[in-house]
Amino acid sequence: MRSILITVYSKSKHKQLITEFRKLTGIFAIVYLLFFNDFTLNAQQYAKLVNPEIGSQGSGLGCGFNYVGATYPFGMVQFTPSFFSPQKGFVVNQLSGAGCPHMGNFPVLPISGNLIHSPKNMEGFKKYKAINQAHAGFLSVDMADHTTAKLTANKRAGIANFKFDKFAKTGTVIIGAGISSTSINNAMVKITSNKTCEGFAEGGDFCGTSTKYRVYFVAEFDRPANTKGTWIKDALLADANHAYGKDSGAYFTFDTNENSEVNYRIAISYVSIANAKENLKANIFEGGFETYQANAEKAWDSSLSKIAIETSNEDRAIQFYTHLYHSLIHPNIVSDENGDYMGSDFKVHKTKGKAQYSSFSVWDTYRTQAQLIAMLYPNESSDMMQSLVDFAEQSGGYGRWILANIETGIMQGDPTPILIANSYVFGATNFDVKKAYKHMKRGATIPLLRSQDQEIRPHLTEYLRDGHTFASMMLEYTSADFAIGQFALQGLNNKEDAEYFINRSQNWKNIYNPKNKWLNSKYPNGKWKDIKDDWREATHKNYFWMVPYNLKGLIDTIGGSKVAVKRLDTLFERLDATYEDDWFAAGNEPDFQVPWIYNWTNSPYKTSEVVHRIFDEMYTGKPTGLPGNDDLGTMGAWYVYASIGLYPSIPGVAGFSINAPQFEKVILNLPKGQLTITGGSTNKPYIQSLKLNGKKFKIPWIDWSRIIEGGTLDFKTSNTPNKNWGKNTELPSYN
């Protein structure tokens, strides 16, 4: 069978191609794939469906905090204008969707002409003027001084092409060493030739926590500079080869009279300059910048091709692949070409036959992204899980939010056991399961245990003694307990421990207040607190539903399905809540699974209705098109799952809560087979009927085991609800 690919192009960027496409086919904006018998496919042009500008603008909780620059799937380098200090140039490490200033090391900036004054902290330069083109693995921008910058990346390096104003006759590239998006404690840059330099930076913080990582770099140009030098604060040091400390860097000035272009490559390492040099040497291509760009696009084409969609809605297709792209940026590689990496004990370790990863926004990603990576990329996911186990072995236990192998301690709960359990049941099994469980159990049973200098489970003493603690923290703990129990059973067949932790997960019942019929924090003496107390980043009405493993028990406790539906309907009157609002927050993690709770209330049509409302009201293809921080692919993965009609609702359980998909056809190229989902629509939000492999299927839940090897899910959708489909069915609930 011949492989055929017809690609959706952005109107704004590829209007001519769309016009030609319409003339040839008479069909508007279809992504259509025919696979070979062995499930291989022609995966060209997926990278160009991605619009990195989506989620790159806004403020506060309503901003995606996504960068527009170039990266590689799970790659070490994110080569981009810094989200938090775009005036400083293009940095080499930036978290995708994280809402606090961080990293942003070694900014590089091309300027026309000679450097006359010290760049100081590089804050005196204008932001780039306009984005020419941006897609997965590539960014082109116009600078304010008629300079053009193109960026791409490979696994451990960033590559740039700078084209200077031809009338300026000279062009200068400045490289910040003692400059980042947060604090710098120490830095050094050394010019090693008229076309190379190297150095390091040390320091940083994230959301109020010090992150004193050290990162090294090596940079080179494709031709020698006419002049070079360094700077330290106010002092411009012409012909000096060294600079140290904060607000320091190096510059190279080129003759652009006959050749206005300069190519630049930079590689980093968290271990040494020598390793950065090896990382730079790896994957060298002949052919200049375009060859590196093509390599990055090919990598993204391959990664994104795991899911193919067919849709008549061009905008939704672009949104989908952009969100899938955001899901595949982190965690990112931190091990060098030779296997070295800086461990969480701040000693150098070496991997064998795998990559080491960091950047784990675990409190966020355990809900959606971890499962998606495990499903589509079980090998990479297994290495990520082993990286977490290694982190725990070296630091004393699991973290909640890990940056450059440093536990920041932000957020609440004990999310890493959930993430590992979720990844395991969805296909990531090639890691040390016994050690993984050892650290789960230690963190859940030993009070005051620390990962680096952060307590793993704050207030665990009270939780073990009283059966309750601060409300939202406790609900996170009970989900972790349930996931640990599932992992003990499925990973180790440890029935005794499984029973203990699954039973302990029912501690949510200890904070149910029968007087107000809400979950409610207590004082240690058992007296009820004010209903508004002890809810972090959400209200009691949002966090109430944070019992995903025992929804039947929760619903029965408040009086049954009718009461639950009424409470849910009230929550969904609006979709744009902030932390203090009592309605649904489409951009906030504790609410992510709530639309699917209708499936447990005999009204699954309302799940599909709400999910499609979220698509229509809260997501767009604009730079402001995300309803919240993407959080290292968390929201991206939410969008992917909701789009295909399968949502992983229960921690540590391999299965999906079902909703109407939004695409006419979806093909998941899974490791064990091809799963085809048909019948979705962007404007028909209700399920009329469903067939699994040609047979009627009436339950709004499907076990992963039934589709892991592929098959067909054929939806029939409509504009009017079928209130009987999925009604009076038994869904998983663990009491």
Image (cartoon, grey):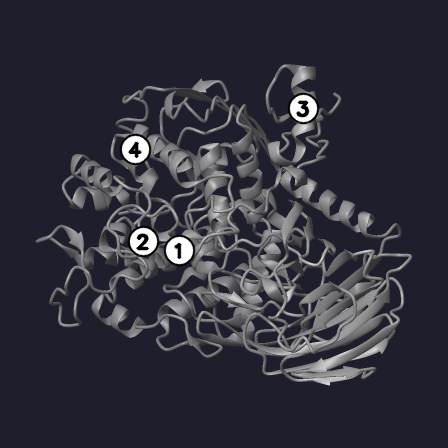
For mark 1, give the secondary structure: helix
Q: Which residue is mark 3?
A: 34
Tag shown at residue 730? 4
Q: Which residue is mark 1?
A: 61
Relative placement, left or right, of 345 versus 492 is right
Q: Nearer the viewer, mark 2 or mark 4?
A: 2
Residue at the image position 72 percent from the left and 44 percent from the top: 297
The CA span between labels 3 and 4 is: 37 Å
Q: Nearer the viewer, mark 3 or mark 1?
A: 1
Disc 1 marks which amino acid?
Leu
Q: Check contact, mark 3 vs mark 4: CB within 8 A.
A: no
Front-lying residue, 349 or 685: 685
Front-lying residue, 616 or 457: 616
Q: Check contact, mark 2 vs mark 4: CB within 8 A.
A: no
Q: Which residue is mark 2?
A: 578
The CA span between labels 2 and 1 is: 7 Å
Q: Quadrant of residue 106?
A: bottom right
Q: Mark 1 or mark 2, which is nearer the start of the sequence?
A: 1
Residue at the image position 87 percent from the left and 62 percent from the top: 222
Residue at the image position 29 percent from the left and 62 percent from the top: 474
Q: Nearer the viewer, mark 3 or mark 2?
A: 2
